[in-house]
Structures are given as C-alpha cells and as structure tokens.
Amino acid sequence: MNGSTQNLQLLTILIISMFFFSACTSLPQRISKESKDFRSASEAKAIISILNSQNHKLKTIKGVGRLTFLEKEEKEMTTRIAWVASTPDKIRITLSSVSGYPIISAANDGQWFYFVSHANGDFYKKRPTNFNMKRFFSISIKSEDLVNILIGRIPLVNYDSTDLILKGRSGKDFESAEVSSLNKDIKGDKNSCVLLLKNKWGNVREKIYLNDRQDAHKVEMFDSTGDLVYRLELIRMQEVKSYRVPYRLKVSNDDGAGFQLDLDRYWADASVSPSVFTLTPPK
C-alpha cells in the first residue's frame, strides 16, 4: 500500500468519525427538544381531560345571590338574582329589587330565548341561534358558557391545536394529577401555566390560566379576529355536596363592563321541571 492510498484511507476515517461524533452530539439535543414538546402536548391533553371531568355528573342547579353590574371596573348597581340551570344550555334568570319584586326575567329552553320586563310588561321570544346574553349582562356570553360556569366547569371552545406555556412550575406532571381539593380562596402561584386553545389557522380562541394546584382561576375567550370576548375570573370557590362550584366570580370585557356574581345559596342536583325554562307574557 503506497502512501497516497494510506492518506486517503485516513482522511476517509477522519471524515466518518467527525460525522458520527457530530450526529451523536446533536442527538441528545434533538431528543431533549422533542421530549419537551411531547411532554407539553401530553400535559395539555391531561389538563383538558381534567377540565372535562369536573362536575361531569352535575346536571341541574338552582341558586340565589347578588349581581353587581360593572362599568369600567367600577360597581354601578347591585341587585338580587335567582337562577335555575340544566345542562347543556337551559337556564332561567330573574333579577329582583332589594325588596324582592322581580324586575326582569330571561330564559333559554334550548329552542327559544325569552325575555320579560316585569316593570313595563315587555315580552319577546326568539330563536337562540348563536345567541348570547349581551342584552342581559352587557357581555357577549353564550347561555351554554354561563351554565357551565355556574355548574363549576370551564367553558371550552372547539379547537384544532393546543399550546402550553409553563411558568416556573416544579415539574409536577399533569398526567398523574387529580382535581385539587377544596381551596376556598384561589391561592398559590396563579401563573403556573397557561393553556392555549387554537383554531386551524393558529389563532388563539381561549386562554386558561391555572395555578400550581391545577385550579383554573381565569379564562379569556377570543373571537376569530383575536379580540377579547369576555374574561372570567373565579375569585373564590365553595364545596356543595361533592362538587366544587363558584362562590364569587367576575365576568368582564376589555372596557371593564360586566358583572360580579356572589352566590349566597346553591342547590346541586336540584329537581327542575322543563317547563321552568319557558316564559309567558305578563298578565
């Protein structure tokens, strides 16, 4: 074997060794990156599973409380409120004066939306297609979302992809997590992670903020253009029977308009007749 042939073989071995070493060096980096992405996707899936399972056996509720209307984050007026709700979207709400006299009522029976003004006798009903409660609460919130919120569930939009932003969490896996026990005041690190639900174009349609106990304490809903529709803040929770349900919550938009709801009494698994969601003109 002549010298030139030996030099060629040595060069070939050197090139192969360099390539192999480079590939082995970059492989852990790729595995680490892919594992991180996979773990986040897995956690997002687990979080959604937890949210879907919350109070899944609770179908009917009744309640009374205080509704405070907000304007630019300032309290404008407080009134009494009573409601009956049945999944997925049946609800009846009545606002009353401090003395207990009904002022207005609204209801959705799944087929029609009804509105009654007890003060002046106005009455109307319409199909609830894409209907929201803006006329009632100054917020574009769907009846189905409102029912879910009152029942203690997080409303979830239809989505095509998810993303999970982790913020200084200690590595606790959501795959093995369970719904946390009663935590009356939402405490802990409120910015532990944010779950993003996106449409097929990659636009964020919903943000769900969770603390380090995996409790959702804030939800933001967006329209297809990316504008905020409403922001839900779960300020305090309570336990009724075996369910974890709201005690105080706030719903608002970017202008600070909305309402705060304080629940004074709450009946879970209430006996509810379908006829209660149908209103008739006042006599």
Image (cartoon, helix red, strand yellow):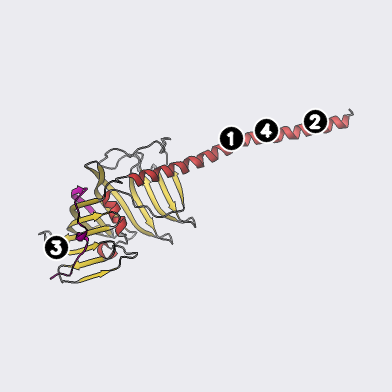
Q: In the picture shown, does residue 256 fall above or below 190?
A: below
Foreground mark, 2 or 3? 3
Q: Quadrant of residue 231?
A: bottom left
Seen at 20% across and 52% down, the residue is 62
Task: Please state the extent of the stretch shown in magenta in the rendering.
Answer: 261-283
Q: Which mark is residue 122?
A: none
Q: Position of residue 151 (x, y in %)?
A: 27, 50
Residue bearing mark 4: 21
Residue bearing mark 3: 102
Question: Is disc 4 surrounded by few (<14), some (14 to 19) or many (20+) residues within 10 Å?
Answer: few
Question: Is disc 1 surrounded by few (<14), some (14 to 19) or many (20+) residues within 10 Å?
Answer: few
Q: Amino acid at mark 3?
A: Pro
Whether pointer 2 and pointer 3 mark residues with C-beta atoms closer than 8 Å, the reply is no
Question: Could you say whether the residue bearing mark 3 is in a helix, strand or loop?
Answer: strand
| Residue 21 in sight | yes
Does 165 appear in magenta? Answer: no
Residue bearing mark 2: 10
Q: Amino acid at mark 2?
A: Leu
Q: Nearer the viewer, residue 70 or 246?
A: 246
Q: Position of residue 40 (x, y in %)?
A: 47, 42
Whether pointer 3 and pointer 1 mark residues with C-beta atoms closer than 8 Å, the reply is no
Question: Is disc 2 surrounded by few (<14), some (14 to 19) or many (20+) residues within 10 Å?
Answer: few
Toward the top, the furthest residue is 1
